[in-house]
Image (cartoon, grey):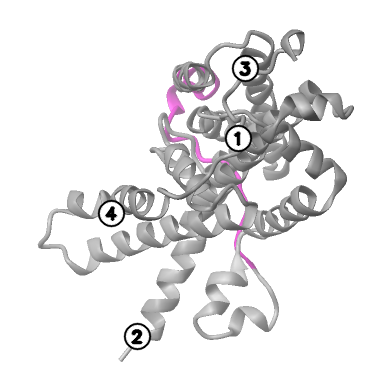
């Protein structure tokens, strides 16, 4: 017999733990649809987390912290765009360099901003918001209708991103840039402008993952707190077939694995907890091997476009 209380707890944990991965995956989808790899998701999560913590710490306002986190993400996205579009460096190398830069920079700045409280300065954040009546539903109520505001923002952004990419002319332009930038350019699509827009939005969405970690989960900033979520998001992009909705579903699957491993730690204390910690990463590896083999990325993702050779 299924324990409905336990199932409800796991699903609520799935939504909470999967939300940061989903934000980052959504950002990755937008960038890759525009022909740019965003390997810097991990670093951008840290940038958003630090921005949110600093903004909330300085003003006491979670909303200002949210705004600061998004701005940090936009700046990091534009920096990655400059390296990829203007300097035409290898996009994988650029993403790795951004991760290393932001990991070190956020660690340094956190010590400058929080001083002796670095790693322990608690900030104001968002509290759980119950939707009347729906939050009282068994099992699904706590998981879908009793979450923090950023979870509801994620759902809205995922639907908006899907509609924009698949149903709007501008979304079609962006997909055309990712598939064949030369043809898109000849058709009058501003290729570079679209790519800068995509990578900036991608950075902002990845930063929202860090904002969620700080303002909705732990209410402090800690060095390296992204803990590999940006890399798991890269797997979610592939499993989601570069679709906003698909990437969100894949991210929630990884969130489910994370929620299960937490439950297993409490219910099986005799087993070393380190064995359970690898569950989300093991699941992402298996899912990529089994389901990712037939995935097809946008045709020109990762290839720098040069107008002089069109």
Q: Specify the label residue 3 is tagged with.
A: 2
Q: Residue at x 23, y 55 (%)?
A: 276
What is the spatial separation of the Cα atoms under label 2 and label 3, in whole angstroms? 50 Å
Counting residues from the N terminus, which is met first, the one under dot 2 or under dot 3? 2
- Specify few, some or many for label 3: CA neighbours under 10 Å numbering under 14, 14-19, or 20 or more: many
What is the spatial separation of the Cα atoms under label 1 and label 2, in whole angstroms? 46 Å
Counting residues from the N terminus, which is met first, the one under dot 1 or under dot 2? 2
Q: Residue beneath label 1, please?
A: 299
Q: Residue beneath label 3, please?
A: 84
What is the spatial separation of the Cα atoms under label 4 and label 1, in whole angstroms? 32 Å
Dot in front, 1 or 2:
1
Q: Residue beneath label 4, please?
A: 279
Query: Is 113 rendered above or below residue 252?
Result: above
Query: Is 70 rendered above or below residue 159?
Result: above
- Which residue occupies the foreground of this view, 27 or 53? 27
Counting residues from the N terminus, which is met first, the one under dot 2 or under dot 4? 2
Q: At numbered mark 3, what does the secondary structure look like: helix, strand or loop?
A: helix
Q: Provide the residue span drawn in magenta.
A: 105-129
| Magenta region includes residue 118 | yes
């Amino acid at each position: 017999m299924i324990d409905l209380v336990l199932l409800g707890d796991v699903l609520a944990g799935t939504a909470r733990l999967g939300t940061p991965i989903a934000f980052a995956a959504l950002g990755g989808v937008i960038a890759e649809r525009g022909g740019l790899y965003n390997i810097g998701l991990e670093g951008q999560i840290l940038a958003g987390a630090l921005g949110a913590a600093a903004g909330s710490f300085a003003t006491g306002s979670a909303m200002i912290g949210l705004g600061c986190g998004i701005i940090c993400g936009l700046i990091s996205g534009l920096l990655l765009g400059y390296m990829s579009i203007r300097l035409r460096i290898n996009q994988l190398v650029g993403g790795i360099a951004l991760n290393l830069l932001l990991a070190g920079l956020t660690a340094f700045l956190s010590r400058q901003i929080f001083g002796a409280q670095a790693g322990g300065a608690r900030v104001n954040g968002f509290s759980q918001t119950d939707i009347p009546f729906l939050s009282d539903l068994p099992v699904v109520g706590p998981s879908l209708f009793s979450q923090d505001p950023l979870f509801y923002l994620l759902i809205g952004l995922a639907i908006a991103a899907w509609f924009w990419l698949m149903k709007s002319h501008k979304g079609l332009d962006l997909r055309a840039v990712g598939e064949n930038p030369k043809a898109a350019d000849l058709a009058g699509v501003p290729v570079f402008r679209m790519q800068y827009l995509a990578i900036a939005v991608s950075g902002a969405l990845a930063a929202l993952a860090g904002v969620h970690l700080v303002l909705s989960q732990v209410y402090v900033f800690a060095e390296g707190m992204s803990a590999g979520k940006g890399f798991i998001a890269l797997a979610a992009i592939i499993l989601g077939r570069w679709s906003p909705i698909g990437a969100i579903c894949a991210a929630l699957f990884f969130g489910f694995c994370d929620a299960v491993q937490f439950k297993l730690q409490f219910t099986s204390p005799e087993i070393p907890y380190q064995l359970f910690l690898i569950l989300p990463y093991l699941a992402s590896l298996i899912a990529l091997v089994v389901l990712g083999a037939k995935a097809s990325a946008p045709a020109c993702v990762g290839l720098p476009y040069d107008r002089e050779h069109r």
